Image (cartoon, rainbow, N blue to C red):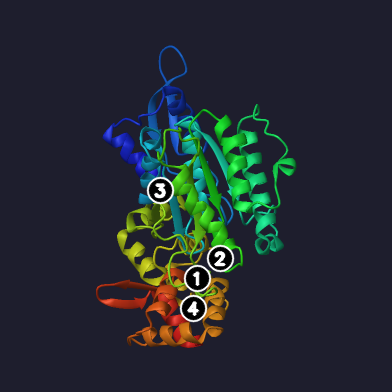
C-alpha cells in the first residue's frame, strides 16, 4: 500500500477487511518504516490511535524485484485483477491460468511475489514458484526437451515439498520413462505424486517463460502448458481437479529477436498486460522519495520518460539522492552518459541489428507512417512506441530525442 493510499484509508475511516492479527502486524511494520506513529490506550497493546508521518526512502537504487516490505512498490490495476481471479478460483469449474506480460523492468516478478504472499497469508493457499531464468535452468537445457521437462518437473516438485514438509514423492529418476513423451512424463508425475497429494487450494507461479522463446523446445513446452489449461484445470470429467491455479510471467522484449508475430500463448487463460505508472502513482512515489512535487512536475517527468517503473525509480533516485534538479535531469537525459544511457543503448543495439525494425521506427520518429504491421507489433512489445486510433508514436520524449540524434 502506498503512503497516499494509506493516508486515504485513514482519512476515509474504511476497513482493511483483514484479520485483526494481520492488521496489527502490518501496522507495526508501517511503524518500523516510519510511516505511522501508534499509540495504545487502555488495556492490551492494540493500537487505538494511528498518526500518519512523513517518510523518505533512504535506501539504494531499487533494481530487480521490489522486496515485500518495501514502500517503493506501487499497486496497479493488475494487482487487483489477479488477486480477484485467484481468490474466487476454488468456487469455479475452471481454475485460473493467468499470463502476466510486459516489457523488461515493468514489475512482473515483483507482482508475482506479492500475489504469492497474498495467497499464502490471506487465502491460506499452498504456493509453488519456479523461475526458468534461475540457475536451475542452464542454457543447454532449452535445446533438449527431455532434460528440460525433467528439470522443470524436479523444480516444481521441490518448491511444493518446501511448502509442505510432509510431501514425499517417489524418485523422479526411477519414474522417468525415456520412450514416453517428456511432457507426458512431467504431467503424469506431477498429477499422481505432487498435486494429487496436496488437498489444500494451491497455485503454481512460473516466471521467466521468455527464456523458452526462440528455442527448439518452445512449441512442445508451451503446448504442454496449454494442455494443462484445457484438460487439467477444468471440470471435463467426473474426476476432481487436482491441478493448481497457474500464473506465468514473461517479457515481451525478446519478440523481435525471435521474429514473433503474436503472443506465444495466445488464447490461453487470462492475459494481463502490466501498465505504466499513473500520474497519481508517480506523485505518491515522489513523496516517498522525499520530493515535494505537484502535478506539474509529475507531468513534466512523464512527458520525458512516460510511466515506466524502472525509469521512474531511476529518475527519482537521481533527483532525491544525487541532488539533481528536474531541469538538469531533462537536459542530461538523452546524453550518452546520462541517467538512462545503459537502458537506451540496449534499444539502440536492437534497432541497429534489425533493418526491418529500424526502418519502421525511423519513419515513426520522423512523424511518418509505417505500414509494416509486424514491425509495429514488435516495436510496441519492446516498449519503443505506443499505438491508438490516431496511429503510432514514439513512447516518450526521451526516446524521441535520443534516437533522432543517434540513429
Residue beneath disc 3: 75
Instruction: Say what secondary structure mark 4 lies in.
Output: loop
Pointer 1 and pointer 2: residues touching (CB < 8 Å)? yes
Q: Quick one: quadrant of the N terminus?
A: top left
Residues under numbered marks 2 and 3 in contact, where contact means CB atoms less than 8 Å apart: no
* Residue identifier under label 1: 255
Tell me where residue 287 appears, x and y as whole percent.
41, 51
Q: Nearer the viewer, residue 217 or 89?
A: 217
361 versus 396 height, above or below: below
Q: CA distance from mark 2 to mark 3?
A: 29 Å
Marks 1 and 2, how far apart at CA:
8 Å
User: In front of the other: label 4 or label 2?
Assistant: 2
Mark 4–mark 2 distance (CA, rounded to whole Å): 31 Å
Q: CA distance from mark 3 to mark 1?
A: 27 Å
The first of marks 1 and 4 along the sequence is 1
Q: Secondary structure at mark 2?
A: loop
Q: Residues within 10 Å of mark 4 (few under 14, many from 20)?
A: many
Is 347 or 129 nearer to us in this picture? 129
Q: Give the distance between the C-alpha atoms of the residues marked 1 and 4, in whole angstroms.
A: 25 Å
Give the residue number, with chain letter if any, for mark 2.
Answer: 213
Residue at which label 4 appears: 334
Distance Cα–Cα, label 4 vs label 3 = 29 Å
Residue at 67 percent of width and 45 percent of height: 154
Q: Nearer the viewer's eye, disc 1 or disc 2?
A: 2
- Looking at marks 4 and 2 on the same chain, the residue that comes earlier in the sequence is marked by 2
Amino acid at each position: 500500500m502506498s503512503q497516499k493510499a494509506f493516508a486515504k484509508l485513514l482519512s476515509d475511516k474504511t476497513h482493511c477487511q483483514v484479520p485483526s492479527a494481520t492488521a496489527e502486524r502490518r501496522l507495526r511494520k508501517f511503524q518500523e518504516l516510519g510511516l505511522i506513529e501508534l499509540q495504545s490506550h487502555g488495556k492490551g497493546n492494540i493500537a487505538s490511535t494511528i498518526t500518519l508521518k512523513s517518510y523518505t526512502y533512504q535506501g539504494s537504487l531499487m533494481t530487480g524485484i521490489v522486496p515485500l516490505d518495501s514502500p517503493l512498490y506501487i499497486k496497479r490495476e493488475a494487482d487487483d485483477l489477479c488477486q480477484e481471479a485467484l481468490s474466487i478460483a476454488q468456487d469455479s469449474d475452471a481454475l485460473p491460468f493467468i499470463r502476466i506480460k510486459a516489457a523488461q523492468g515493468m514489475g512482473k516478478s515483483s507482482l508475482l511475489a506479492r500475489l504469492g504472499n497474498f495467497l499464502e497469508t490471506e487465502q491460506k493457499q499452498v504456493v509453488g514458484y519456479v523461475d526458468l531464468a534461475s540457475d536451475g535452468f542452464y542454457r543447454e537445457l532449452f535445446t533438449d526437451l527431455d532434460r528440460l521437462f525433467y528439470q522443470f518437473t524436479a523444480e516444481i516438485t521441490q518448491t511444493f515439498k518446501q511448502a509442505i514438509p510432509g510431501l514425499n514423492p517417489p524418485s523422479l529418476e526411477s519414474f522417468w520413462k525415456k520412450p514416453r513423451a517428456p511432457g507426458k512424463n512431467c504431467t503424469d508425475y506431477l498429477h499422481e505424486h505432487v498435486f494429487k497429494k496436496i488437498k489444500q487450494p494451491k497455485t503454481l507461479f512460473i516466471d521467466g517463460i521468455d527464456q523458452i522463446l526462440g528455442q527448439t523446445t518452445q512449441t512442445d513446452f508451451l503446448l504442454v502448458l496449454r494442455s494443462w489449461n484445457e484438460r487439467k484445470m477444468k471440470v471435463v470429467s467426473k474426476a476432481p481437479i487436482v491441478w493448481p491455479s497457474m500464473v506465468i510471467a514473461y517479457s515481451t522484449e525478446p519478440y523481435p529477436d525471435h521474429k514473433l508475430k503474436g503472443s506465444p500463448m495466445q488464447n490461453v487463460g487470462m492475459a494481463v498486460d502490466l501498465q505504466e505508472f499513473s500520474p497519481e502513482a508517480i506523485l505518491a512515489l515522489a513523496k516517498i522519495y522525499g520530493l515535494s512535487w505537484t502535478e506539474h512536475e509529475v507531468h513534466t517527468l512523464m512527458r520525458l520518460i512516460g510511466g515506466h517503473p524502472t525509469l521512474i525509480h531511476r529518475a527519482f533516485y537521481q533527483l532525491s539522492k544525487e541532488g539533481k534538479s528536474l531541469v538538469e535531469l531533462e537536459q542530461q537525459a538523452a546524453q550518452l552518459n546520462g541517467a538512462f544511457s545503459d537502458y537506451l543503448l540496449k534499444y539502440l543495439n536492437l534497432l541497429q541489428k534489425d533493418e526491418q525494425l529500424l526502418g519502421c521506427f525511423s519513419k515513426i520518429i520522423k512523424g511518418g507512417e509505417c505500414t509494416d504491421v509486424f514491425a509495429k507489433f514488435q516495436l510496441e512489445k519492446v516498449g519503443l512506441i505506443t499505438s491508438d486510433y490516431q496511429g503510432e508514436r514514439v513512447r516518450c520524449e526521451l526516446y524521441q530525442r535520443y534516437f533522432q540524434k543517434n540513429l
